[in-house]
Image (cartoon, rainbow, N blue to C red):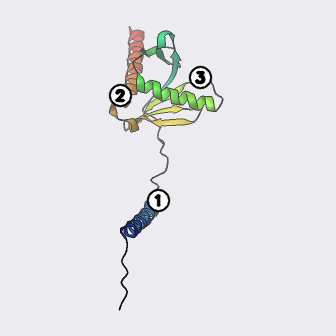
Amino acid sequence: MTAQTTETPGAIIHRRALVACCVLAVLTVIVTAVVVWTDSGTNYAPEASPAELVELRFEDEAEGVVAVFNADTGVRLIEYGLDEGVFVRSVMRGVARQRRLRGLGPEAPVELSRQADGQIWLNDPASGVQIYLGAFGPDNVGAFEEILEREAQTLSAQLGGTES
């Protein structure tokens, strides 16, 4: 008589799990190789000079208000009440945290820029943090676009006031 070997259901499941793990490992190696060969993981930073650039200072004020000032002129551009500007507050908390980790204070301004192609970046020269704001979606970018628009309005009002 010939002996037949039958596999238990548990052995079949273990074999399938082993095959799945091997497939996952091979796919991981392939994806990693593609990323390395195509430089997909390279950090991107804008190379050209920005079309618009404003240096900003953010200050916490009474009753939870955050005020945004042009660092060069001291002009108040916008203020956010307690439940306003949530995304701007979040981004700036992250920048403040990076400064604290490096032993830096809030004195140095941050740079908000719009590139010629419309990309908006927040750059903190003090800590080296660069944030591409477009990665957070159009609604969140809009919060920083509003700051750039307020700066443009302030600038045109100043230019209009000096011509008369």
Q: Which residue ends up furthest to the right in the rendered image?
A: 103
Query: What kind of residue is marked 2?
Result: Gly
Q: Earlier in the sequence, mark 3 or mark 1?
A: 1
Disc number for residue 32: 1
> What x and y, as percent, mark residue 140?
37, 30
List the residue tagged with mark 2.
142
Q: Quadrant of residue 26?
A: bottom left
From the viewer's side, name the closer residue of 79 and 158. 79
Q: Earlier in the sequence, mark 2 or mark 1?
A: 1
> What x and y, as percent, mark residue 99?
60, 29
Disc 2/disc 3 C-alpha distance (Å): 24 Å
From the viewer's side, name the closer residue of 52 and 120. 120
Query: What kind of residue is marked 1?
Result: Thr
List the residue tagged with mark 3.
106
Query: What kind of residue is marked 3?
Result: Pro
- Dot 2: within a 10 Å radius of its alpha carbon, few (fewer than 14), some, or many (20 or more) residues? some
Identify the element where label 2 is drawn. Answer: helix
Q: Quadrant of residue 12?
A: bottom left
Identify the element where label 3 is drawn. Answer: loop
Q: Quadrant of residue 158?
A: top left
- Dot 1: within a 10 Å radius of its alpha carbon, few (fewer than 14), some, or many (20 or more) residues? few
Q: Are marks 3 and 1 in contact (CB under 8 Å)?
A: no
Identify the element where label 1 is drawn. Answer: helix
- Dot 3: within a 10 Å radius of its alpha carbon, few (fewer than 14), some, or many (20 or more) residues? some
